[in-house]
Image (cartoon, coloured by chain):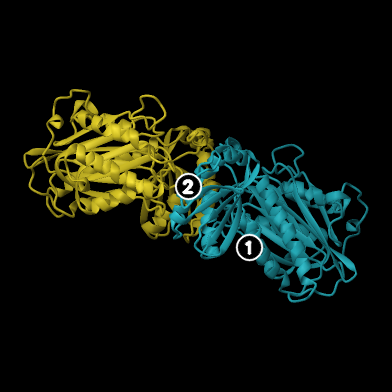
Chain colours: A cyan, B yellow
Amino acid sequence: MIPAHVAAGKNTKSAVGSNKLGPKGFQAAGIASGIKAVEGAKDLALIYSEVPARVAGLFTRNRVKAAPVLYTRRRVRGGICRALLVNSGNANACTGKKGLMDAEAMARLTASALRIPHQHVTVSSTGVIGHPLPMKNIERGIPSLVAKLSPYGFPDVAEAIMTTDTHPTVATEKVAIDGGEITILGMAKGAGMIHPQLATMLAFILTDAEMEEGALSLLLREGVRSTFNRITVDGDTSTNDTILLVANGAEGNSPLYPGDGRFGPLRDALFGVMDRLAQAIVRDGEGRTKVVEIVVRGARSSKEAEKLAFRVAHSPLVKVAFFGQDANWGRIMAAMGDAGVPFDPQKVAIYFDDTLVVKEGMQAEGTGENKVREVLKKEEFKVIIDLHEGTSQVSVLTTDLSYDYIRINASYRT
Amino acid sequence: MIPAHVAAGKNTKSAVGSNKLGPKGFQAAGIASGIKAVEGAKDLALIYSEVPARVAGLFTRNRVKAAPVLYTRRRVRGGICRALLVNSGNANACTGKKGLMDAEAMARLTASALRIPHQHVTVSSTGVIGHPLPMKNIERGIPSLVAKLSPYGFPDVAEAIMTTDTHPTVATEKVAIDGGEITILGMAKGAGMIHPQLATMLAFILTDAEMEEGALSLLLREGVRSTFNRITVDGDTSTNDTILLVANGAEGNSPLYPGDGRFGPLRDALFGVMDRLAQAIVRDGEGRTKVVEIVVRGARSSKEAEKLAFRVAHSPLVKVAFFGQDANWGRIMAAMGDAGVPFDPQKVAIYFDDTLVVKEGMQAEGTGENKVREVLKKEEFKVIIDLHEGTSQVSVLTTDLSYDYIRINASYRT
């Protein structure tokens, strides 16, 4: 069933990470098809599993969903996936019926080139909203992609899914199992519009583990909660966010299930990949000069802690103060007060890393301005907010708001 | 009961607006007391009514309320006001018990210098959060203020309440009544952290009309809903927002009440003053190069329209696109989809002024790019979003997000 030219091993380009292959039984390719205006910029990618694989997906909660999201969500419900087609440079969002037809055409063209059912192909897009896809480029690109498929093609995929990202985002983990070894490979794009609910983010996580039905979506949901849904760059949520987890069982382990003794190490490794991708996305946030972890602790519930942490993480005034290396804790207090969460301002303590700056809602006495300034000069630091109201804690990773964020986003489309 | 040196008319400095006085029976003064670091910058102001006046107030909904807000809110409940003391340069917020004592001390010092009950003095502050007030400057300043009180002092008040505002914000209206004339004078400061719920905004509106008890707070609430609560600069809400409406009855009209035939013209004039102050605040928004009215119409309820309008008005990506003069309607659609309001994206139309750019959720055919570019080059324009879901409409005034917003706020405190 697999076309001859997609057999493994014939391509010896630089592989993922430190010269390693992706998970067993997966091949990939990424090319420049001319969707992006920049000559030679990769913008079309294909991931292929040599055997039918299980798939689970999570998608944007934005009410304005791009055509590939509407299409792929339906496909993922079927539970089986053989191929993932992805383009950058055009989001195929707000493109009406034509957009939906284009998304389906992308799947059908891929399926027919690979000789697999079109229901087993997912489609993802990222880029500018509101422009029809240049289908000619995609039609021409798909046969080239299929011809280039190789177990060494993943770095090209990571590159082809980028938009304003400054570098490809890849993470891998290995887990020993049943005398063999499971590989997990994740690739993501982020950069702008990062927010909980997966805002403009595409992430594809592949593993050669064999999993029982249901285990996959359980893992994905649980993992996203503590990783991708805990990062934010600007609070805007995109129309195209998609995260797909694909497991093809090529390792040949006996099927994993929750409660299984072997499940824990796999979960840890998977969450590790997701966490590294999520963190890498924030670190590559548009124009950021700082990465700041907002920790809210001593809250009455994790829901309240999360609301507070995100309100602080999204406040333009707080983010600009980070950029200005200004210990402006008053803006943090003001943002907290605006989160719709009850708390007693007079009990609040705030630390910058381990330096206490606010005690009982006021400037802490004896805090050396120099010590605080040293923390704010760092590229990464923590803001720890202790409410002294309860025992719940949540941590959110955010960036500062810089001149470059504005430069990038004022000129992105033009 | 009025000290001799506060008698009207002895000062002949330039008066409010085109050489006019404020409302009858009010006097004012503004001085540089040294709270602001800049030599000679006015930072302390006093407004005085020669007779006891009715007062109504609205205050920030931020849970972190500055001491003067906590103090003045209590005073306003009493319904009577003779004097309003205001300082800029220091917000007296997050200053604990000392802050509350300082706010009360400000009222008591003012009361004793004016020989009025301290319960009839309101106190407002704006500026940096978390620093104790320099009470020595205020103690020294109050007698100077009282000595300088004059019916011509209002421009000095408008100047003394400024922080990063680039100019004083003043509006006046006159209404004929009972053969005489009512004057309404409003002064405000805004500039940063502007948001519904009155975010860092101080506004003082004075009138010499005689009003029945209850009429004042009714008018204030109704007026704010369609003026100050419909503007936004950065979505941040401050700890100090205060709007006070003071009516001293010095015109001598028979008391106005809702339902009264004379009430309509007064209300229109008052709302006109509030609207002009609110608009002026947005036009003076930090670093803005554009003023954009976001109109959401065809909504199923005004609550939903308002949520959508504010979600669009607060989106950093939308605001940066305005700055970049980029007709990026996709970001508008994405922001709408994230507002938590149900609507059918396929029914949405978007106009930039009267140019249709989105029809049925897609790029409108035949829209000249040049025509759209002309609209985006304008300093002020409208974005009209028609949901085609119902008949409700809400309009919100916002700004773009520019390099200067970041420059101002990265360096404001230092």
Q: Which of A365 and B359 is in front in this view?
A: A365
Q: Residue B314's mark?
A: 2
Q: Nearer the viewer, residue A245 or A65?
A: A245
Q: Are marks 2 and 1 in contact (CB under 8 Å)?
A: no
Position of A259 relative to B157 (above/below): below
Dot 1 corresponds to which residue?
Answer: A225
Chain ID, mark 1? A
Circle 1 crowding by C-alpha within 10 Å: few under 14, some 14–19, many from 20? few
Residue drawn where x is 76% and y is 46% of the image: A159
Q: Tell me the SS state at disc 1.
A: helix
Image quarter for residue A290? top right
Q: Would residue A322 be found to the left or right of residue A146 on screen?
A: left
Q: Nearer the viewer, residue B76 or A245?
A: B76
Q: Residue A333's mark?
A: none
Quarter of the figure that contains the C terminus of chain A: top right
Quarter of the figure that contains the N terminus of chain A: bottom right
- Tell me how far mark 2 sits from mark 1, CA to CA: 25 Å
Residue drawn where x is 41% and y is 54% of the image: B63
Locate residue A244, reporting x and y percent: 71, 61
Chain ID, mark 2? B
